[in-house]
Image (cartoon, coloured by chain):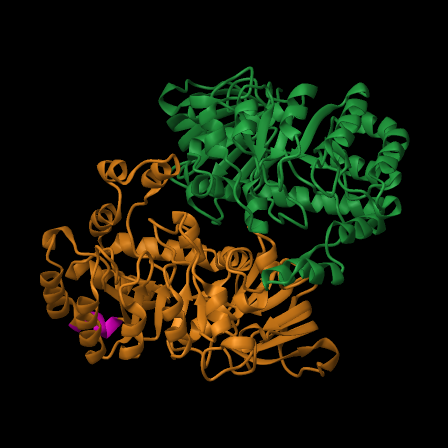
Chain colours: A green, B orange
Amino acid sequence: MSEPRLLIRDLAQLATPAAGDAPLRGASLGAVEVIEDAYVLCAGEEIEAVGRMRDLGPLDGNVVELDGRGRCAIPGLVDCHTHPAFGGDRVEEFSLRAGGASYEELHAAGGGIRSTVRATRAAGEDGLRTAVERHRSWMLRQGTTTFEGKSGYGLDRDTELASLRAVRDAGGVPTWLGAHAVPPEFEGDADAYLDFALAEVLPEAAEIAEAADVFLERGAFDAAQARRYLEACRAAGLALRLHGDQFTEQGAIPLAIELGARSVDHLEATGEDGVRALAASDVVGVVLPASALFLGRPMPPARTLVDAGAAIALATDFNPGSSFCESLPICCSLAATQLKLSPAEALSACTVNAAHVLGRADSLGRLAPGYRADVVLLDAPDWRYLAYHLGGRIVDEVVLAGASELR
Amino acid sequence: MSEPRLLIRDLAQLATPAAGDAPLRGASLGAVEVIEDAYVLCAGEEIEAVGRMRDLGPLDGNVVELDGRGRCAIPGLVDCHTHPAFGGDRVEEFSLRAGGASYEELHAAGGGIRSTVRATRAAGEDGLRTAVERHRSWMLRQGTTTFEGKSGYGLDRDTELASLRAVRDAGGVPTWLGAHAVPPEFEGDADAYLDFALAEVLPEAAEIAEAADVFLERGAFDAAQARRYLEACRAAGLALRLHGDQFTEQGAIPLAIELGARSVDHLEATGEDGVRALAASDVVGVVLPASALFLGRPMPPARTLVDAGAAIALATDFNPGSSFCESLPICCSLAATQLKLSPAEALSACTVNAAHVLGRADSLGRLAPGYRADVVLLDAPDWRYLAYHLGGRIVDEVVLAGASELR
């Protein structure tokens, strides 16, 4: 007997972004197709068909049915920028900052990325695996069926590799963020740290990770250092990402374009020239509104980027210091209220375009035949509640590769 | 045999705001008491004792135990400003606004409060009861154990009274917002509408509601109309609230002080004189950061108010048009990141101070003997994750009047 197929039936609505061989941009970003009174038919791990209930013919064989009444289906969400491999938390620093503490006070209280590096190194491989699994389960409850996960809180050989393995083994897409910060043992000598990282960590990191990432910013790595790091990583077979223009413009966009990076992420500080350059390129701009909210920073110019023709993606930046938020639905609300993206643009940005950033747009990010059967069922009469219902328990059930994972 | 007592044991932490005969202000707002390795003992609907596990003696009689390991307890949250009695939604308007639509386009699309008035009148009493019950269940999942609920989308006699009954019968605290807007049948003549409302609706509304509320703003009701409405409501035995300083200052704070109102709510537009006046008064300032976020408006000057000595409360403003957000935990995150309140100040503002606004501070808003046994169990190692973990499923379980309602 053949394996049963899964029929999600009588959905109030089904919403799926447009198809595209390249990341969606311009009007196509908001061109979400909506089917009322819809079904999704899954066979094994893939979608076999979607359509209107009235067009659904008789189904032969063993079919398991899932009642979609009063609910809407969207593709499983793709979070293309997270930092899930860390020990400890930063709640003390968060609380001090909320009460108006200065940077000096935060530093005196042991805050900042270095506190997370200490806790991450202390967690050990088992501790990191447990942490990443927990964070993955949090993401799944919010509808994220695919997550990218960066290393970058180890900054030594063993902890960086353990972080990448933990992400990979939790089903995530690992990115080696070897150039996140200069660790204390290389204080004041970023180049010496990069010598170490590229010689001692990259060879094995390149076996586990799919991409490399660098934090190009004052106080972290400059453009020359970022170039050296990324060129070495590219030579080792990794795709390239950049954290750029978060606080200041340090040349991230031109460098990303020159090196053929998949994305440049943050962009809160991007000015007109950067917008124009990104719009004329194939690099995806990843916007992270929860991070801007968390830090009380200006929002990235997402509307301007889209209107200029740039391809953008939307991600959480989940991490303990500047975005303790794993919820893409909240990011969709922030996209609508703070970035002036329509719910349709926000949906495309955290599904199909995010899948492009991860090199998986052939199988993820849409509800269409041949795509992986990752389906989020929303407790809502209209799929746009994804952005409209801020903070509600909008994600009602998640189907992951054809199996109901969560209700 | 006596009814079993409920022992919530081995809590990682218990956090409870300071006691106060009056709303907490100044330093006392942030004076949250934290007990590590704690218990809460409930007898019937009340808390009998709280303390450290090591100080817990043997318990006689029938005791049901709830395992608090890895979790933190805070008081049930009190939402003192919501609009849960409505039909329909405003997702179309939200989506158009997100995409940059002008007010004219929104109006042409049938948006605005009038669309909700139409849908609310059409819902009928059963429809309103269903809606309020649904919204109450959403709030409970986010840790809200007491909610205030306003009428104000009916604006005719039957729908206003049905709204108040629906709130009351769902266990909420009803507020008659008879002066929310001028309904279409009185277009352009707010005074004639108030003549009607005070003559035809107030007498029965005063039998159901505990307070009256008015929207004092350009395009709604002016200060003279608000005074007339509130004085009549006060004479009918209702406590007084005001929506004030949301877009412009129209004298809400002086009027609230003069009439002895319990609160003035919104305050996004409050200037220095208003801050000073409110700080010198007994009126509570209710801040609604989700509403400011939803509308992309400036945040209310909560930090300035607290530093000036004003008593503030924190609420969701849950409603379909300007804050489709029932989550007080999200409001706590917004309070910390946007209003610069510490997690402790945010907690006091949506528990004990909100209970003061509702006239229930003798029994709600604290974890202490004699208070109602409303307890929220957070999935967190530190209670401040309430504000820190933005959008996570932080509320793990809710105990309502001594009974576990939700896990």
Question: For the point 66% across and 83% down, which residue is it?
Answer: B60
Q: Nearer the viewer, residue B214 or A106?
A: A106
Left or right, A270 with reference to B205 = right
Q: How many marks?
A: 0
Q: Is residue B70 visible?
A: no
Q: Along the horizontal axis of the image, is B212 left or right of A372?
A: left
Tell me what residue is drawn at x 59 percent, y 41 percent: A316
From the viewer's perspective, tell me whether residue B308 is left or right of residue B318.
right
Q: Where is residue A364 in the image (x, y as percent from the top left)?
A: 59, 24
Q: In which quarter of the image is the C terminus of chain A?
A: top right
- Residue B87 shows in this picture: yes
Residue B20 position in % (x across, y down): 50, 82
Is residue A221 shown above or below B62?
above
Q: Does the magenta stretch include residue A139?
A: no
Q: Where is residue A180 in the image (x, y as percent from the top left)?
A: 75, 39
State the extent of the magenta-drawn residues as a range. Answer: B203-208
Per the picture, the main secondary structure of the magenta-coloured stretch is helix
Viewer-closest of B251 and A67? B251
Name the image quarter holding residue B343.
bottom right
Q: Nearer the viewer, residue B62 or B137?
A: B137
Give how far across and how far down residue A217 sits, in percent: 69, 39
Q: Quadrant of residue B67?
A: bottom right
